[in-house]
């Protein structure tokens, strides 16, 4: 049917059907209802492509239209994004991947759960009066640390007769510890900055022969404390008292 509108001629095939090469009946559909006389355009149906109303495919290998498979892909992608999360996600041990990565980063290397620092300075310089029996001059938790480095100063008037380094295997009572170095122990301390490789208990670097440290002298000690819960340092003099001042740092 020929239709004239606005001085233009249109061929109305809105209600015309024709048979395709496969024998399937196909239609040409005009804009709108197909019967309003507007210029028509072809409408093609392909079962492989499917319809926008197709539901998402329920498997990856079934017989589904392309649109159904695409909807399944979008569902999987949305799920994946939810698993990965966002960079702003707060740390969580059970949350999104980004939240778990943040949790790992914040807790790595720190048993206390805080962000792991590479070093920790001992909070205060400690000065202790040392007498004729072993006196503790420093006791520090080393469970999360690899090395303890300390500077030891005899600021009093008496020389030391012993300086012990003790490594504790447990923080519970009764305490159990290994005597790592003391006066009289073979290869206990050295007199220079040398690693005590022949000390089978623990490698120690010692800048001074600590058990015989004289008055107004100082020394340095570095201890590999990876196998111990805590380290304790004790000193002693032959008579009277002296003052020992210690400061230092814990390192990973």
Image (cartoon, rainbow, N blue to C red):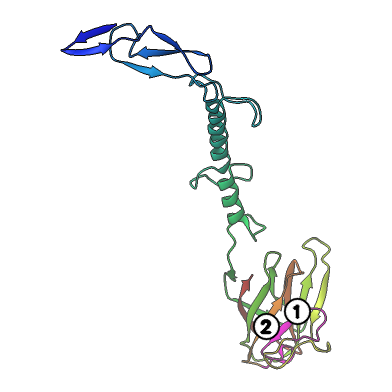
Residue 85 on the magenta segment? no
| Contact between labelled residues 1 and 2, with CB atoms less than 8 Å apart | yes
Q: In this rendering, is residue 177 above or below 9?
A: below
Quadrant of the rendered structure where residue 241 is? bottom right
Q: Nearer the viewer, mark 2 or mark 1?
A: 2
x and y percent of residue 39 in the render? 28, 15
Query: At x 62% / y 79%, what residue is drawn?
Result: 246
The crowd level at tag 1 (other Cα within 10 Å; few <14, some 14-19, many 20+) is many
Observer-nearest residue: 149 or 166?
A: 149
**85 lies left or right of 11:** right
The crowd level at tag 2 (other Cα within 10 Å; few <14, some 14-19, many 20+) is some
Quadrant of the rendered structure where residue 1 is? top left
Q: Which residues are magenta?
A: 196-214
Q: Kindly identify which residue carries mark 1.
A: 165
x and y percent of residue 188 in the render? 79, 87
Observer-nearest residue: 37 or 78?
A: 37
Instruction: Report the Cα–Cα distance between label 2 and label 1.
Output: 10 Å
In the rendering, which numbered label is found on residue 221?
2
x and y percent of residue 158 in the render? 68, 91
x and y percent of residue 17 in the render? 42, 9
Indicate the quadrant containing the C terminus: top left, top right, bottom left or bottom right.
bottom right
Quadrant of the rendered structure where residue 73 is? top right
**26 lies left or right of 202:** left
- At mark 2, the secondary structure is strand
Residue 204 on the magenta segment? yes
Q: In this rendering, is residue 132 above or below 176?
A: below
- At mark 1, the secondary structure is strand
Q: State whether the magenta stretch is mostly helix, strand or loop.
A: loop
Q: In this rendering, is residue 21 above or below 66?
A: above
């Amino acid at each position: 049917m020929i239709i004239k509108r606005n001085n233009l001629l249109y061929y109305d095939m809105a209600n015309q059907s024709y048979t395709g090469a496969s024998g399937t009946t196909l239609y040409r559909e005009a804009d709108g209802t197909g019967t309003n006389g507007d210029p028509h355009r072809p409408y093609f149906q392909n079962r492989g492509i499917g319809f926008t109303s197709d539901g998402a495919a329920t498997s990856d290998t079934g017989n589904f239209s392309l649109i159904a498979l695409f909807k399944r892909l979008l569902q999987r992608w949305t799920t994946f994004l939810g698993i990965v999360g966002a960079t702003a996600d707060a740390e969580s041990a059970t949350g999104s991947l980004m939240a778990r990565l943040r949790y790992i980063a914040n807790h790595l290397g720190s048993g206390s759960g805080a962000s792991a620092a590479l070093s920790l300075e001992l909070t205060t310089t400690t000065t202790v009066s040392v007498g004729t029996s072993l006196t503790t001059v420093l006791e520090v938790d080393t469970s999360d640390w690899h090395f303890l480095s300390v500077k030891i100063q005899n600021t009093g008037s008496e020389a030391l007769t012993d300086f012990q380094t003790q490594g504790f295997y447990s923080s519970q009572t009764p305490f159990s510890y290994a005597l790592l170095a003391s006066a009289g122990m073979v290869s206990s301390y050295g007199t220079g900055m040398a690693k005590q490789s022949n000390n089978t208990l623990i490698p120690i670097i010692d800048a001074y022969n600590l058990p015989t440290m004289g008055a107004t002298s100082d020394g340095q000690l570095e201890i590999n404390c990876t196998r111990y819960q805590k380290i304790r340092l004790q000193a002693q003099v032959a008579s009277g008292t002296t003052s020992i001042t210690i400061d230092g740092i814990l390192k990973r």
